[in-house]
Image: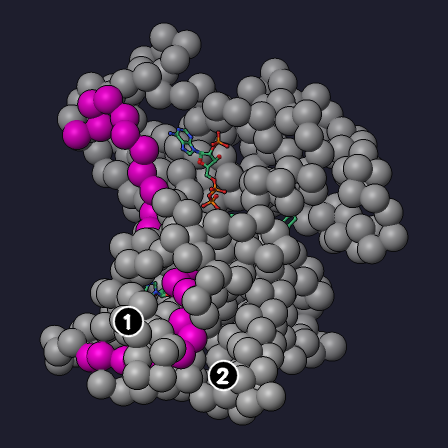
Amino acid sequence: MEEVRVLIVGAGPSGLATSAYLNHLSIPNIVLEKEDCYASLWKKRAYDRLCLHLAKDFCSLPLMSHSSSTPTFMSRATFLKYLDEYVTKFNIRPRYCRNVERAWLEDEEEDGEKKWRVEARNIETGEMEAYKAEFLVVASGENSVGYVPEVTGLDTFEGEIVHSSNYKSGRGFEGKDVLVVGCGNSGMEIALDLSNYGAQPSIVIRNPLHVLKREMVYVGMLLMKYLPVSVVDAILVGLAKLKFGDMSAYGICRPKLGPMQLKFATGKTPVIDVGTISKIQDGQIKVVPQISNIDGETIEFENGVRRKFDAIVFATGYKSSANNWLKDYELVLNEKGMPRSGIPKHWKGKKNVYCVGLSRQGLAGVSFDAKAVAQDISNNISNKFK
Ligand SMILES: Cc1cc2nc3c(=O)[nH]c(=O)nc-3n(C[C@H](O)[C@H](O)[C@H](O)COP(=O)(O)OP(=O)(O)OC[C@H]3O[C@@H](n4cnc5c(N)ncnc54)[C@H](O)[C@@H]3O)c2cc1C
Ligand SMILES: NC(=O)C1=CN([C@@H]2O[C@H](COP(=O)(O)OP(=O)(O)OC[C@H]3O[C@@H](n4cnc5c(N)ncnc54)[C@H](OP(=O)(O)O)[C@@H]3O)[C@@H](O)[C@H]2O)C=CC1
Ligand SMILES: O=C(O)C(=O)Cc1c[nH]c2ccccc12
């Protein structure tokens, strides 16, 4: 059994940022990561052509901004280089290949204080390791496991089925009819990538969505410092109408709530167009309604149309998996493994458990949470000695 002040589960940007801030405050902490590297989502589970959609001002972790020579919109490789420098600068040493399988609040200690017990499987040795901590930080990610919806007849589908987290590029899909299910940022960019590689993609769009350009979002983020969000949204929708026009003929309608208000209220990110819309408008990418059922290689849609496909890419989003290992999850999370409390106090649970990076606000949200959590832990420790 190893004792530590703070135990952090996950070495993605959230775990790294929390550890960095705790190190800065000289608070001992251990980071446990199930993969053999940090930022595994960015290194192993993202498609090749991924670039950050937000400007660098909104993509830094606490205590270290991007250098002035970094371009406004970074590639994944540049972001990973930043993380390399971050880990070195703050001397963060995650323990890799440690899959946290169980964490719970231990019964009363002799001094009357409960502590967190954490059990992690060392994937290399197969042994279970035990830890005891005063504070527990959930940093296992809101994009932890790929979500695939239930579809009637999916088990009969004869072609390839892949979730967006396992999609790298359109190589191998040349000349194929591919159905992309889901029109978030992953689905829209994967449809474009497939088309660029010579596949014939179709994309399922079942609900209204906002489409913006990354420059519009950048301007919107800056304007939000000075203007109410409803005004910023009106400007963004105006710009989007100028740029893309009315897209209802292609099955794309705008939601009633503006893009920024929707993001804050529900976490639903506007689609940041990287070239998909013009391919939809010129027919290289087809929009289709929701699937009603699958029978062998034939997929039937809710408008009654039936078509054959060679492959399906599910870009249907992700789920948090924290509830699988965090037994006392209700102290901080709901049944879906997401924060119980709304923004801005979502990061603080009861009994010294916290969460970082589960507010669906991207890297800016990660940074906010990590700082808040580390400072709260620091206050908690110093109050004890008052
Ligand atoms: C394709 C894609 C692109 C994105 N692009 C952007 C972007 O450009 N800008 C932006 O702001 N946001 C983006 N996001 C959102 C992204 O989730 C966050 O930016 C960021 O990665 C969140 O960091 P995190 O540390 O909270 O989660 P993650 O990066 O998911 O890291 C969590 C870590 O915890 C580990 N872990 C999970 N369970 C356990 C366990 N039981 N035991 C031990 N370790 C565990 C995982 O292996 C993982 O390494 C993107 C998301 C996706 C899916
Ligand atoms: N470069 C970047 O910065 C990128 C950032 N990201 C971010 O990563 C996060 C995850 O994105 P993403 O992977 O796109 O996931 P999202 O959760 O954002 O999108 C999931 C999509 O799947 C659709 N969907 C879900 N269930 C079904 C179903 N049963 N049938 C049909 N459609 C369905 C949703 O539609 P509906 O709205 O109708 O539910 C939605 O369009 C987001 O925050 C995103 O912005 C992702 C890629 C690139
Ligand atoms: O890329 C994402 O999914 C993000 O969550 C980043 C993000 C945070 N706030 C936003 C507002 C508009 C567009 C993207 C984001």
Residue 87 got which mark? 2
Could you tell me which residue is drawn at 46 percent across and 62 percent down?
A: 350
- Mark 1 residue element: loop
Callout 2, which amino acid?
Answer: Val
Task: Please state which amino acid type lies under the numbered disc 1.
Answer: Glu
Residue at x-position 61% and y-position 16%: 249
Q: Nearer the viewer, residue 117 or 45?
A: 117
Please say whether residue 141 is one of the residues in the magenta stretch. yes
Q: Is residue 65 left or right of residue 131?
A: right
- Give the SS element for disc 2: helix
Q: Quadrant of residue 125?
A: bottom left
The percent coordinates of residue 14 (x first, y second) are: 49, 68
From the viewer's side, name the closer residue of 79 and 176.
79
Identify the disc placed on residue 47: none
Q: Quadrant of the C terminus?
A: bottom right
Residue 83 picture location, percent across and down: 52, 76
- Residues in magenta? 129-155
Q: Position of residue 338 (x, y in %)?
A: 44, 50
Q: Closer to the camera: disc 2 or disc 1? A: 1
Question: Nearer the N terminus, badge 2 or badge 1?
Answer: 2
Q: Name the residue that disc number 1 marks.
A: 106
Quarter of the image for the N terminus: give it: bottom left
Contact, mark 2 vs mark 1 (Cβ under 8 Å): no
Residue for point 52% across, 43% down: 185
In which quadrant of the rendered view does residue 241 lie?
top right
Q: Is residue 378 above or below residue 275?
A: below
